[in-house]
Image (tube, coloured by chain):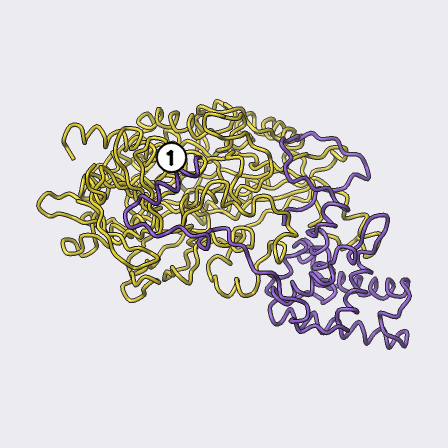
Chain colours: A yellow, B purple
């Protein structure tokens, strides 16, 4: 490599999928430039809050009014707090427009949301890849489960996914590390649910991207059960770019990481119908740079990958690179949730838990599965936990003074609760597009959202609440309360679609190998590629898609096809 | 990860901006507003200190005053409460003082421990009677996020408990606090009298 502006490959974004792209491509010998629009976060050293007690934050972790007023989106949910302040992206610098409410939680930093994710890691199942075609929804996936199965194994082994082999078709087993443990109450409720539903419903331990065995070769230590994952893990226990893929990519000597690098557009060459590189705006100096490469991996996160495409080759296509099908920006999905049930579990007064387990239980989908048929399509899974109540509980009967102090400092009864995560159907009407009137801090056009959950999801939500309530009641849980609280698309932070994979360039943006139909040396392997959403947490699938596409890209380069 | 190597790679990046210490994520936040810069007077503080002391007194373990909860909570209220919540809190302080004058003919801070307890207990009962179950279920600190307003005493009680149990004294000397548990036991024995684990926030 003679020219410092020229690389074999450019990876746009450094989150879960970008980290994987960098690791795979560098390990295959390519010289790679990884561009990250935000600042660097150095592993361990920059996790400045990782060892703080609540009293070490100015307001013990809670947001101030100033923060609330400054962040009209972050304040809608947990991202607004003192503990992770500075990691979730500020609306002040990076605004967006909402024709309909869309909660967009971003993290423009090295590592992206790999430092802030929920770490639940599930494979899609065979049906997930078939459902669109069977039901005539959107377009067919161009790949099947068997195309991805080995890649799931490949990424699971490296990332480190703890989980039990449960032997369920609906939730294929993977290459797991030893599982974390259900607690005593969860185990008993699992047995009661199994009995009540004839072995057709399963409460299992969450499959989670945490090491349960140390890996000195990766410089990663097994989970210490602190549950401070979002502060960065000084033990490298959970999978993040910083703990796993970035060190591997760095070790090859083939990676250059450039923070503060906003990719404005991909440079498209009409004659070759290829992208020749990217134009970068330095977020600190506002200078622009051009970097060239043979291939580009877009891993900027679902909506920013789509933004980059929309902002590219506009002299050829009004709506940008990849828009020839008319589907770029469409079919925006999330997982809808904030609906489920809670209840009180009698007994177990002589039991408690030790350690803060960074996962809960999972109840895989059971609706529209096998002989089960509903008046809507697809389904949902539940994520929940059983726990003894602590100091944050109803204290109205405890009075004040010494009596209150004594009562509330002892644990309360066991509670159990589970929140459903439901599949959102791909729908052409759910869309995002450039708003050229509104500009961000760097003068770049912003995204505008026009998407919502619709009839299928609304029907599903009724079952998402009532089925959990029914399972708890069937297991002898008391005071069962079903709930359906505020949800808007995006709140699941599982945004997917907008540059879907497909079989036909007329109806999809990407082909079966995540290549942009309109520029085959551009690969999009983050959530934008998803043709449908399944109901399971999606990050593991992005990892597998990325590793698969990187392998294909390198082969295609060798063959001289791209 | 080899830090030196990472920095070298970043420095080698073409035209890369310097990665300065001021550009770190996980921002080190400025301290809460000092008490003297809030709108609370010395008199307010002394009254509030007496209220906190009555809600969470010192027993065989430290109480709210030992934990610095009165000052923390006033600074917290100043920085975190909405204007309507702040003014409700202040009306509450005025009301408690007036009730004390009416009932006992002297300042709340001058009352005997038992008198303070009786007065605030009555306020607590009244507040509970007004609260829906939902308000009570909402948890200690979320009162800050509520759109409506609870009775002022509910707010006072909740913020005191929040401030106390997230303080170093409250978390480590009154509750049980473990920074690095190292393992998980989902079948851990519990004996009556064992304290709860301290909340993380």
Task: Judge left or right: residue A364 versus residue A526.
Answer: right
What percent of the width, then of the height, locates residue A69?
51, 66
Q: Quadrant of residue A443?
A: bottom left
Q: How many marks?
A: 1
What percent of the width, then of the height, locates residue A550?
28, 32
Which residue is at the front of the view, A35 or A460?
A35
Q: Quadrant of residue A537?
A: top left
Q: On the rendered image, what quadrant is the N terminus of chain A found in?
A: top left
Q: Which residue is mark 1?
A: A541
What percent of the width, then of the height, locates residue A533?
38, 41
Q: Quadrant of residue A517?
A: top left
Q: Which chain hosts label 1?
A: A
Which residue is at the front of the view, A119 or A284?
A284
What percent of the width, then of the height, locates residue A121?
46, 34
Name the residue at 47% across, 62% down: A72
Task: Judge left or right: residue B201 versus residue B125.
Answer: left
Above or below, comparing residue B193 to residue B132 in the picture: above
Name the residue at 86% across, 51% down: B59
């Amino acid at each position: 490599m003679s020219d410092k502006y020229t690389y074999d490959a450019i990876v746009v974004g450094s989150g879960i999928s970008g980290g994987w792209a960098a690791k795979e491509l560098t390990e295959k010998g390519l010289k790679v430039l990884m561009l990250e629009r935000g600042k660097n976060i150095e592993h361990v050293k920059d996790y400045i809050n990782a060892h703080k007690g609540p009293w070490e934050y100015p307001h013990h972790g809670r947001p101030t009014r100033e923060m609330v007023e400054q962040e009209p989106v972050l304040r809608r949910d947990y991202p607004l707090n003192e503990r992770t302040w500075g990691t979730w992206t500020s609306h002040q610098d990076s605004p967006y427009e909402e024709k309909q409410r869309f909660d967009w939680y971003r993290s423009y930093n090295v590592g992206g949301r790999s430092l802030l994710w929920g770490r639940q890691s599930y494979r899609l199942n065979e049906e997930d890849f078939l459902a669109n075609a069977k039901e005539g929804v959107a377009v067919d996936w161009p790949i099947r489960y068997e195309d991805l199965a080995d890649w799931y194994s490949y990424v699971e082994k490296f990332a480190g996914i703890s989980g039990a082999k449960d032997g369920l078709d609906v939730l294929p087993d993977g290459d797991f590390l030893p599982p974390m443990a259900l607690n005593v109450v969860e185990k008993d409720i699992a047995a009661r649910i199994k009995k009540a539903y004839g072995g057709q419903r399963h409460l299992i331990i969450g499959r989670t991207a945490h090491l349960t065995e140390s890996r000195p070769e990766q410089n990663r230590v097994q989970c210490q059960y602190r549950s401070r994952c979002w502060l960065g893990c000084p033990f490298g226990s959970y999978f993040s770019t910083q703990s796993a893929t970035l060190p591997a990519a760095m070790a090859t000597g083939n990676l250059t990481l450039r923070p503060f690098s906003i990719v404005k557009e991909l440079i498209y060459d009409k004659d070759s119908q290829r992208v020749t590189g990217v134009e970068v705006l330095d977020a600190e100096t506002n200078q622009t740079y051009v970097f060239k490469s043979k291939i580009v991996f877009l891993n900027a996160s679902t909506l920013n990958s789509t933004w980059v495409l929309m902002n590219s080759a506009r002299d050829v296509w009004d709506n940008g690179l990849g828009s020839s099908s008319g589907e770029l920006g469409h079919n925006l999905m999330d997982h809808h949730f904030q609906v489920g049930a809670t209840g009180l579990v009698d007994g177990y007064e002589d039991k408690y838990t030790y350690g803060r387990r960074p996962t809960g239980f999972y109840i895989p989908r059971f609706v529209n599965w096998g002989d089960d048929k509903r008046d809507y399509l697809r389904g949902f899974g539940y994520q929940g936990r059983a726990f003894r109540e602590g100091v944050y509980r109803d204290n109205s009967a405890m009075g004040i003074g010494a009596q209150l102090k004594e009562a509330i400092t002892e644990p309360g009864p066991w509670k159990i609760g589970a929140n459903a995560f439901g599949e959102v159907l791909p729908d052409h009407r759910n869309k995002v597009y450039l708003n050229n009137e509104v500009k961000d801090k760097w003068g770049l056009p912003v995204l505008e959202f026009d998407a919502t959950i619709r009839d299928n999801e609304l029907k599903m939500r009724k079952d998402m609440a009532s089925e959990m309530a029914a399972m708890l009641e069937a297991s002898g849980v008391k005071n069962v309360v079903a709930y359906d609280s505020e949800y808007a698309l995006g709140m699941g932070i599982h945004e997917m679609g907008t540059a879907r994979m497909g079989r036909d360039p007329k109806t999809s943006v990407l082909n079966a190998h995540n290549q942009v139909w309109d520029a085959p040396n551009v690969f999009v392997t983050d959530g934008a590629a998803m043709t449908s959403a399944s109901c399971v947490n999606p990050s593991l699938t992005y990892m597998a898609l990325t590793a698969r596409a990187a392998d294909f890209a390198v082969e295609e380069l060798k063959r001289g096809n791209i | 990860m080899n830090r030196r190597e990472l920095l070298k790679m970043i420095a080698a990046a073409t035209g890369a901006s310097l990665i300065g210490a001021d550009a770190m994520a996980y921002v080190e936040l400025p301290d809460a507003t000092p008490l003297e810069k809030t709108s609370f007077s010395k008199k307010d503080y002394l009254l509030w200190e007496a209220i906190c002391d009555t809600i969470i007194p010192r027993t065989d373990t430290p109480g709210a005053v030992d934990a610095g909860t009165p000052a923390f909570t006033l600074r917290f209220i100043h920085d975190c409460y909405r204007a309507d919540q702040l003014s409700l809190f202040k009306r509450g302080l005025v009301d408690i003082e007036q009730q004390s004058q009416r009932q006992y003919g002297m300042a709340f801070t001058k009352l005997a421990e038992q008198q303070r307890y009786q007065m605030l207990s009555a306020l607590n009962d009244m507040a509970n009677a007004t609260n829906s179950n939902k308000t009570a279920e909402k948890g200690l600190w979320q009162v800050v996020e509520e759109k409506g307003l609870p009775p002022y005493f509910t707010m006072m009680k909740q913020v005191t408990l929040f401030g106390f149990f997230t303080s170093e004294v409250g978390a480590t000397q009154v509750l049980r606090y473990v920074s690095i548990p190292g393992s998980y036991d989902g079948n851990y024995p519990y004996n009556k009298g064992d304290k709860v684990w301290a909340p993380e926030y």
